[in-house]
Amino acid sequence: MNKAANISTADLQRIDAAHHLHPFTDYAQLNREGSRVITRADGSWLWDSDGNRYLDGMAGLWCVQVGYGRTEIVDAVTRQMMELPYYNTFFKTTHPPAAALAEKLAELTPGDLNRAFFANSGSEANDTVVRMARYYWARAGKPDKQVIIGRTYGYHGSTVAASALGGMAGMHEQAGMIEGVHHITPPYWFGYGLQEGMSPEEFGVHAARELERAIDAIGEDKVAAFIAEPIQGAGGVLIPPETYWPEVKRILAEREVLLVADEVICGFGRTGNWFGSDTYDLQPDLMPMAKGLSSGYLPISAVMVSDMVADHLIGEGGEFYHGYTYSGHPAACAAALANLEIMQREDLVGRVANEAGPALKAVWTELGAHPLVGEARMCGLFGALELVPDTSDLTRRFDPVGEVGVMCRDFAFRHGLVMRAVRDAMIISPPLTIAEDEIAYLADRARKALDDTYAALKAEGRVA
Ligand code: PXG
């Protein structure tokens, strides 16, 4: 019998509080409240150590595309572990799963992204991007092209380089910045354009032109790359106005700057296409990916590299001093291959585009009429509800920002639904396999959480 199964929730919480430092956590607060202990999962559902069941509206951390409990992935990993649990891909060596996965990713990704550099997390993939972009330009005879332009509310990971690429001010304050990173305004109409009285279309062009102004001010001869998520995920599911990406493409086509599309969240079906780059017709030069690549069953990430960049890296020889012990780990590659096999066989991307996505969008749009919701947005299978104090004046926000989102998130948990709060927006990003009745459950529980939040705020006189 599993030893952990005999331990009470209180004991597990005590042990955890004594020895475990969690990511992105206020430790004093967590230790006061005690961790939620998740012990089991199946399909779209999670169970905690007290036997409570939750619909996982976040697919783990935006990653469990095929749902939990897929024995096919487990079996593929077991077979690989028996055959070859580990060997490296350094020193002129490869192994079957790494080669097969690289080929598969070249087939699935758009354009001429024909080569994969493997790592273990989205953060490592983005550290690879920084080093590879700068190395590429040095090899191309333009060593001054060092600056990378990112965006406010972008999230690219938590290592020193990846957090610098991201646009989360709190992270910069704690970790410091690396040299040569610049941030511009994101295409977040509800957060910026609305406040300035612009239509979404006007604001899309306006936000894109900030990239043009930034490149021209810094100097094209100094800018290596623009990094962007096709839709910003952790920043709050910021779906850009339709005018944004076409204008960015125009700006980049006129300039020698690499486009890095961070597909860590958008990739693998989330937007209703294999990649967010397909949704917005982008041809990135570098494409970091992670999460849905293995549906989170094992940690693995990759940077897909275009022929133009790869030709310079490969062309005249010379070593790229970069890589990780577990780059292309055989068991993780086997998990990814089995995961992609499921996604293709079950046509999960088509399911998001034609069935689950439209069904979720319909109920989400209905939630948009709730007296607490200022905007409901959804693309594919991820969306956000912006909570506001007064729907007759959408420029107003709760003060302090973030408190109401957490309140609503906690109510959702009590009603058996995992939603995530970003500032005061409620976020949903369920497994791509979410069933019709589960979508109805999600909508019902989200509404209950909104109702409870509204009632609590009304009692305090904080909503109209
Ligand atoms: N790029 C993007 C677009 C991401 O969303 C990373 C890179 C970094 O990946 P790793 O594997 O290093 O975590 C991410 C990760 C949240 C949350 O609460 C989001 C992420 C990670 C953890 C929490 O929204 N995104």
Image (tube, rainbow, N blue to C red):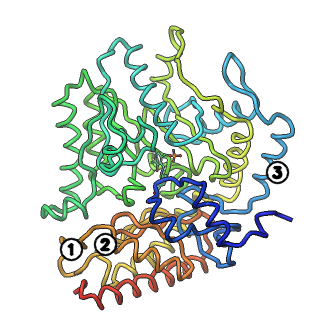
Q: Position of residue 225 (x, y in %)?
A: 34, 31
Of pointers 2 and 1, the one earlier in the residue sequence: 2
- SS of the residue under disc 2: strand
Residue position marked by numbered label 3 in the rendering: 75
Name the residue nearer the viewer: 440 or 399: 399
Q: Position of residue 36 (x, y in %)?
A: 58, 69
Q: Amino acid at mark 2?
A: Glu
Q: Amino acid at mark 1?
A: Leu
Of pointers 3 and 2, the one earlier in the residue sequence: 3
x 65%, y 79%: residue: 52
> CA separation, marks 3 and 2?
43 Å
Tally the numbered discs: 3
Residue found at the very far left of the displayed protein: 197
Q: Taking 243 as reference, is 52 above or below it? A: below
Circle 1 residues within 10 Å: few <14, some 14–19, many ≥20: some
Callout 3 touching callout 2 (CB < 8 Å)? no
Ligand 1 within 8 Å of the CB at mark 3? no
Q: Position of residue 12 (x, y in %)?
A: 66, 66
> CA separation, marks 3 and 1?
51 Å
Q: Amino acid at mark 3?
A: Asp
Callout 2 touching callout 1 (CB < 8 Å)? yes
Circle 3 residues within 10 Å: few <14, some 14–19, many ≥20: some
- Where is the N terminus found, in terms of image quarters? bottom right
Which numbered disc covers residue 394?
A: 1
Name the residue nearer the viewer: 314 or 41: 41
Name the residue nearer the viewer: 391 or 127: 127
> CA separation, marks 2 and 1?
9 Å
Which corner quadrant of the image does residue 103 belong to?
top right
Relative side of 250 to 89, left or right: left
Residue position marked by numbered label 2 in the rendering: 375
Ligand 1 within 8 Å of the CB at mark 2? no
- SS of the residue under disc 1: loop
